[in-house]
């Protein structure tokens, strides 16, 4: 059974090796992230009266092992830290001989334990993680019902959970308990500090069972306030840039009107008005070559109509901000932005042969820097 779980663990580790985004989580309500557990338990008992360290070759002898069960209820306060109250019993051994029937006893133990989900602590919270590695330690009290004795205990272990769904997981729990020497009914006085553990009752247990998560079994991602601010600021910057372009065009047209003198027609001559267009900007989000807002194309439509009516060429120049990305990346990005606007012009009916594209790379000609994440469109 342990080998089977080891196989699942290896597969789970391979799955979890895929890089996942690390992010902060918000605190849930008190009633969220509770869980209950039920396990079958196999325990090996080692009494203080034996006066020796635990020996592996005698650990699984039938006269010191027995089956039992455990139930627990707990809560995760963060993805990495939780508490559980655990009851374990009920069939045990008081090792006074190598006779199973002589050693038989009944007991119970209640512990309060602190859980540390190291998978979430070191790898970041991942709601789709299959395997969670959870060391714990705790303390409590136990009673040997066959001998009517009580004893305090300390315990530590490793809980492995293998998720079947958001609500259900398989448990593999390995733990070690250290009891006052009267726990198994055969009191052995404490020895000196040296080798004192040999004079205490001990248990080594392996538990297999299920965890069922109550209420909300996941954690919500904390909103990235800075990202929201940056997005809002980017939209404001784009609007400001459009306003600056519009004001520049208004100023240019006012100067043309003020200084323009209409030529007089002579004989049968026709006066042809020249179409003059200031550059129109189309904006992009940081690092992207997809047009941020289709509203920017409303002004481009006027240039497209003028180019079609006069069979003139259009020049599209792409830009990136020099503060973000390498020079090579920005050169490629600015070209992609120019091509994206050129594709939009083709959709408006402009002949592709009448569109020229250019890539200016990363620049810082406009302030703030986000104004430079654009492509300009103008008649040649």
Image (spheres, grey):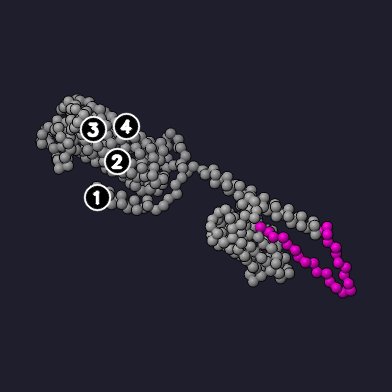
Q: Earlier in the sequence, mark 2 or mark 1?
A: 1
Whether label 4 touches label 3, CB < 8 Å: no
Position above or below: 354 against 117: below
Q: Residues within 10 Å of mark 4 (few under 14, many from 20)?
A: some
Q: Which mark is residue 158?
A: 2
| Left or right of residue 285: residue 78 | left
- Magenta stretch bounds: 257-281
On whether residue 234 falls in the magenta region, the answer is no
Q: Residues within 10 Å of mark 2 (few under 14, many from 20)?
A: some
Whether label 2 touches label 4, CB < 8 Å: no
Q: Earlier in the sequence, mark 3 or mark 1?
A: 1
Q: Residues within 10 Å of mark 1 (few under 14, many from 20)?
A: few
Q: Nearer the viewer, residue 378 or 196?
A: 196
- Residue 231: x and y in percent read 58, 48
What's the CA distance linking mark 1 and mark 4? Answer: 29 Å
Residue placed under numbered mark 4 in the picture: 112
What's the CA distance linking mark 2 and mark 1? Answer: 16 Å
Identify which residue is drawn at 73% across, 55% down.
248
| Left or right of residue 75: residue 261 | right
Identify which residue is drawn at 24% across, 37% down.
176
Report the predominant secondary structure element of the magenta stretch: loop
- Residue 185: x and y in percent read 17, 27
Q: Earlier in the sequence, mark 2 or mark 4?
A: 4
Residue placed under numbered mark 1 in the picture: 3
Q: Earlier in the sequence, mark 3 or mark 2?
A: 2
- State the quadrant of the C terminus: bottom right
Q: Earlier in the sequence, mark 4 or mark 3?
A: 4
Q: Which mark is residue 286?
A: none
What's the CA distance linking mark 3 and mark 1? Answer: 27 Å
Residue 218 visible within the image: yes
């Amino acid at each position: 059974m342990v080998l089977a779980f080891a196989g699942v663990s290896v597969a789970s580790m391979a799955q979890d090796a895929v890089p996942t985004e690390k992010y902060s989580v918000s605190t849930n309500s008190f009633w969220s992230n509770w869980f209950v557990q039920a396990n079958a338990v196999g325990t090996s008992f080692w009494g203080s009266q034996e006066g020796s360290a635990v020996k592996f070759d005698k650990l699984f002898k039938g006269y010191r092992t027995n089956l039992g069960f455990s139930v627990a209820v707990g809560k995760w306060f963060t993805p990495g830290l939780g508490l559980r109250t655990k009851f374990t019993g009920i069939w045990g051994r008081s090792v006074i001989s190598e006779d199973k029937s002589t050693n038989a006893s009944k007991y119970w133990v209640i512990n309060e334990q602190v859980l540390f989900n190291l998978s979430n602590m070191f790898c970041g919270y991942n709601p789709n993680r299959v395997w969670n590695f959870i060391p714990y330690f705790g303390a409590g009290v136990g009673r040997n019902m066959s001998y009517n004795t009580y004893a305090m205990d300390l315990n530590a272990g490793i809980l492995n959970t293998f998720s079947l769904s958001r609500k259900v997981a398989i448990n593999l729990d390995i733990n070690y308990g250290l009891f006052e020497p009267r726990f198994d009914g055969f009191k052995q006085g404490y020895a000196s500090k040296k080798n004192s553990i040999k004079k205490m009752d001990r248990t080594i247990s392996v538990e297999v069972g299920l965890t069922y998560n109550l209420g909300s079994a996941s954690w919500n991602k904390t909103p990235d306030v800075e990202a929201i601010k940056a997005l809002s600021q980017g939209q404001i910057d784009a609007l400001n840039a459009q306003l600056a372009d519009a004001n520049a065009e208004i100023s240019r047209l006012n100067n043309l009107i003020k200084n323009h003198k209409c030529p007089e027609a002579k004989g049968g001559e026709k006066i042809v008005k020249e179409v003059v267009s200031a550059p129109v900007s189309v904006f992009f989000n940081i690092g992207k070559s997809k047009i941020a807002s289709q509203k920017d194309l409303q002004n481009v439509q006027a240039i497209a109509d003028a180019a079609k009516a006069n069979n003139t060429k259009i020049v599209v120049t792409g830009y990136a901000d020099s503060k973000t990305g390498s020079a090579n990346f920005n050169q490629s990005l600015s070209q992609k932005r120019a091509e994206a606007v050129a594709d939009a012009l083709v959709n408006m009916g402009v002949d592709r042969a009448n569109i020229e594209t250019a890539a200016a790379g990363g620049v810082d000609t406009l302030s703030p820097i986000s104004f430079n994440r654009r492509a300009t469109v103008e008649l040649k």
